[in-house]
Amino acid sequence: MSEFKAFDFRTKFGSRYFPSPIFTASGCAGSGKELAQFFDLDELGAVVTKSIAVKPRSGRATPRMAETPSGMLNSIGLQGPGIDQFLANDIPWLQSKGARVIVSISGETVEEYATLARKLRGINALFGIEVNISCPNVENRGLVFACDPIASRAVIEAVRRNIGGDYPIIAKLSPDVTDIVSIAKEVVSAGADGLALINTILGMVIDIDAVRPKLAGITGGLSGPAIRPVAVRAIFQVHAALPNVPILGMGGVATGRDALEMIFAGASGISIGTATFGNPTAAIKVKEELLGLLQSKGFNSLQEAIGIAHG
Amino acid sequence: MNINPRAIQKSVEVLSNKKVGSYHHMVFSVGEMALHAKPGNFVAIAVGGESSAMVLRRAFAIYRASDRGNFGGTIELVVAAHGSGSRWLSERAIHDRVDMVGPLGTSFGIPTEPVSALLVGGGYGSAPLFGLAEVLKQRGCRVDIVLGASNANKIYAPLEGKRSVNTMTLTTEDGGAGVKGRVTDVLPQLIEKHKTEIIYSCGPMAMLEAVDEIAQRSQVIHQCAVEESMACGIGVCMTCVIPLKDEAGSIRMQRSCIEGPVVDGSKVIWGSNRKIPPGTWGSSS
């Protein structure tokens, strides 16, 4: 038995260690309370919250959802209670459950991102901030920050200035750009410690009986296994250009095999999103399958496996 | 407290699958999941098998739940094979297994006093009403039921269901069975005749809206099980929202899987498909 070595499943973003690389994906885990009935939240590396805004948001009208082959479109429009109620209700509960929390934030202006970062200072359970600069379901779709390197830089700099302390900042990028590497380089030089790749891809379904777009919001974000190859490509390209920047990979991961593919492409952690809609315990299933796969392939740690597809 | 406090996830066995009219009546061996299931609750089922291209769960109202009997706990569903997911489910054979999460959502409120109740079902929306009728009967309520559909084949009215109601009225739009017309054509006279004190309804949103208008006009309490397409059934996806008035009268987009499916009809802002009602909490209008 002396040959047995405990597998090191830890991962790291910025200054923070996480005991497992499997996180929830923003907007796919509710407040945490919905999933806690099915597993203990501290089994996750971290809970990534829904993207929270300065003020309450009703979100978009229904229909908000259309299932597509191996995926779905959503146009929720960042429905949420606003940062003050979120801090008063959701955060203390997550903290009481021992969850490591990455708060996802979304603003309409650079100032709003700065305000959100300021309000998050000093929260015990806070293990990082995901800066969502790439939600496709906001009113001013033409102005998604993550499509513009200058705007992306301004947001990350504002968050960095206002958050204080050494909280890791993870910038969530959109795949709907011509050159994701140039955006990635810009946000990293502005102070991002990590990158979340990828947000949903803008898509559309037309109801052929009603002869109009299926979603009330006309367009929606495509997620699920249908977009996984796009995510793997984005992770691979960005890791090649920025090998020392940790990547939180996401986009259609439903099995340990899917997670391992992204880790080999260069991801340090994996977020589980749409798979949770089909299976409340998807994140735990992926975690166990990934651990088994890494061990059966002879790895001693997660770190050894990151990015090895680059040769 | 957790949300979904009574829900469990379980691989359950198909015990029976019979075609009844346009629908499939299916029985599942669910063990302890049946214990906490109440009329109005629903289950969410993964469809398509391991390599399925259908990534979202399908929600089904529970037709009946029993926590005893030869097979232990059972849950019964009435499945309308409308789309590829429900068709897949309706094709499951005896001994096949499916992944089920439940019981989920709110249930019909049961009066503490014996009252006169009128149950209104549209199409397979009648499914949860028979279990409700049994519970109401046990409480000494008078129970009348009206079921409507476009044609007779689409009315789900099993024989055993008739035993737990005082009267059953059928309406069909083509006149093939019962009264020609819609459920709302017969509601006012039934309310008056049976001195209805509470209406329970389940069916398409347009029907619920029409029933609610009559209920409000007649000053009868109305509980309805709403229908908005769901992706998860457990409250994480935020797709199944409907605008509901809260205690203070403020309108909020609420999840029909958590704050529903059974809601107080007078709290629903009807006709809100493809628009956010003005004044909704957190909206720009």
Image: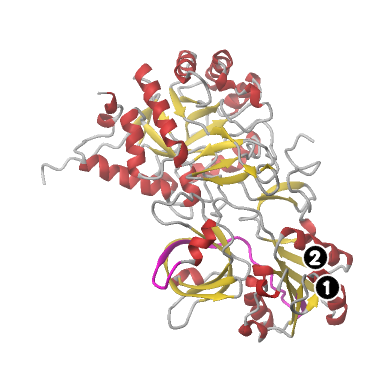
Q: Which chain carries label 1?
A: B
- In the rendered view of the protein, which quadrant contains the C terminus of chain A? top left
Is residue A11 among what the camera can see?
yes
Tell me, yes or no, whether dots 2 and 1 are on the same chain.
yes
Q: Which mark is residue B187?
A: 1
Viewer-proximal residue among B52 and B285:
B52
Tag 1 secondary structure: helix
Viewer-proximal residue among B209 and B48:
B48
> Is A64 situated left or right of B247 in this image?
left
Residue B4 in the image: state x and y as whole percent: 55, 57
Is residue A162 among what the camera can see?
no
Up/down of A243 relative to A309, above or below = above
Q: Callout 1, which amino acid? A: Leu
Viewer-proximal residue among B87 and B28:
B87
| Quadrant assignment, res B143 | bottom right
User: Callout 2: 10 Å neighbours few (<14), some, many (20+)?
Assistant: many
| Quadrant assignment, res A66 | top right
Q: Which residue is under mark 2?
A: B211
